[in-house]
Image: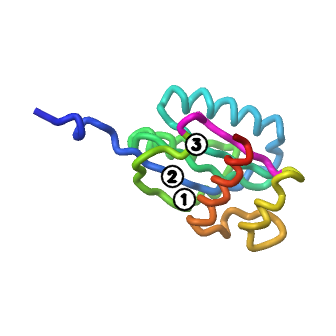
Amino acid sequence: MTSIMEDAPILMSMTYASRANPGVSAKDFNEILKQAQVNNATNGITGMLTFNKDYFLQTVEGPRAQINRLLYSLIADQRHYDLQIIETRELKYRTWSKWSMNYATPTEKNAAIYLKYSTTVDFNPYLLSAESARELMNELSDQRD
């Protein structure tokens, strides 16, 4: 006989960066976002996504098995390449429990947030530490709430 605790899935968070393939437009980003919102809601995944014309930075959270399945589909997605995991960790609770996929794109209003965490004038998520990526995503999300 198993206890309820043994049956409860382990909640995980995964943050990754990737490079947008040339030609990925704002329209493509909107399609990616809509697709992620639908798929994530179905699979019990929540998260935060940011995109500028060159890079994606995303944090997803959900049951470990679902995060692993999502990772395989992200690797196969032809709209981006050079996917690098910045951090994975177990969670006690979700940061974005009300968002199947929250998002932010660079604007004049949030430019200072991007600059605060960037090591260069241009935003490059590959240069972020795990902690900086987490804090950036939290600040961008707070601004959207």
Residue 94 drawn at (x, y percent)? 49, 44
Q: State the CA–CA distance, disc 2 to disc 1.
A: 7 Å
Q: Are marks 2 and 1 in contact (CB under 8 Å)?
A: yes
| Vertical comparison of 138 with 64: above or below | below
The residues colored magenta run 97-106
Q: Nearer the viewer, residue 117 or 52?
A: 117
> In terms of image quadrants, where is residue 118?
bottom right
- Which residue in the protein does label 1 denote? 85
Q: Nearer the viewer, mark 1 or mark 3?
A: 3
| Residue placed under numbered mark 3 in the picture | 47
Which quarter of the image is occupied by the C terminus?
top right
Q: Is residue 13 left or right of residue 99?
A: left
Residue 144: percent from left, percent from top: 73, 42
Question: Disc 1 and disc 3: Cα gap in Å?
Answer: 15 Å
Specify whether 118 is left or right of 126: right
Q: Nearer the viewer, residue 10 or 31?
A: 10
Q: How is the image coloured?
A: rainbow
The residue under the point 73% across, 55% down is 55
Q: Secondary structure at mark 2?
A: strand
In percent of width and height, residue 75 lies at: 56, 48
Q: Quadrant of the N terminus?
A: top left
Q: Residue at x 33, y 39 (%)?
A: 9
Mark 1 belongs to which amino acid?
A: Ile
Tag 3 secondary structure = strand
User: Of helix, strand and loop, which mostly describes the magenta segment?
Assistant: loop
Kind of residue indicated by mark 3: Gly
Q: Residue at x 83, y 45 (%)?
A: 23
Q: Specify the label residue 14 is tagged with.
A: 2
User: Gap between marks 3 and 2, in whole Å?
Assistant: 9 Å
Q: Identify the residue at horizontal 47%, vertical 57% (top origin).
A: 88
